[in-house]
Image: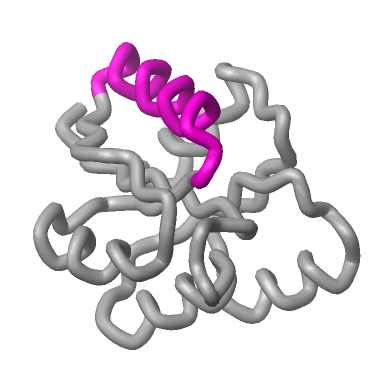
């Protein structure tokens, strides 16, 4: 596997854990981003095949708004990885046509299976 996955996660330990897991399974993870301001430049630089997006990030906008911005410049699939599973948040996220919605804490096998499924 040579697919590149960009992780957007403001909890450093969670981001590093996802990064370590996916690297072990053969994915390229160029970096973990913790805010929306760095997202579009990172998308342009790394050209990821998938974005794992937390909904609550260190920005004035949240992950749903960031995913909407990405849609303006790219068709990269987004999978939300979040602790927020309330109907209002899920409804907003659904409008961005995500390829998945994982609720934290996410088991390693679920994360890897979801990433592989989206990228296959």
> Quick check: 72 above or below 58?
below
Q: Which residue sits at x=46%, y=27%?
A: 18
Determine which quarter of the picture holds residue 31: top left
Determine which quarter of the picture holds residue 7: top left
Q: Main secondary structure of the magenta part?
A: helix
Is residue 18 located in the magenta-colored stretch of the structure?
Answer: yes
The one of 113 and 102 positioned closer to us in this rendering: 102
> Quick check: 56 above or below 24?
below
Give x and y (percent) for residue 5: 30, 43
Visible in this render: residue 112?
no
Residue lying furthest left in this view?
Answer: 45
Residue lying furthest top in this view?
Answer: 24
Give x and y (percent) for residue 25: 33, 17
Q: Which residue sits at x=50%, y=67%?
A: 59
Is residue 31 located in the magenta-colored stretch of the structure?
Answer: no
Residues in magenta?
Answer: 10-26
The one of 113 and 52 positioned closer to us in this rendering: 52
Give x and y (percent) for residue 65: 54, 78
Horizontal side of residue 46 vs 16, given as left or right: left
The one of 39 and 74 positioned closer to us in this rendering: 39
Determine which quarter of the picture holds residue 21: top left
Give x and y (percent) for residue 51: 39, 53
């Amino acid at each position: 596997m040579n697919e590149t996955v960009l992780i957007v996660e403001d909890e450093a330990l969670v981001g590093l854990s996802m990064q370590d897991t996916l690297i072990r399974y053969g994915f390229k993870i160029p970096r973990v981003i913790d805010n929306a301001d760095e997202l579009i430049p990172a998308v342009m630089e790394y050209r990821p095949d998938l974005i794992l997006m937390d909904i609550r990030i260190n920005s004035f906008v949240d992950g749903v708004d960031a995913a909407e911005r990405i849609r303006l410049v790219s068709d990269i699939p987004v999978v939300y990885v979040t602790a927020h599973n309330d109907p209002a948040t899920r409804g907003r996220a659904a409008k961005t046509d995500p390829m998945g919605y994982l609720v934290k804490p996410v088991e390693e096998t679920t994360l890897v299976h979801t990433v592989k499924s989206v990228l296959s």
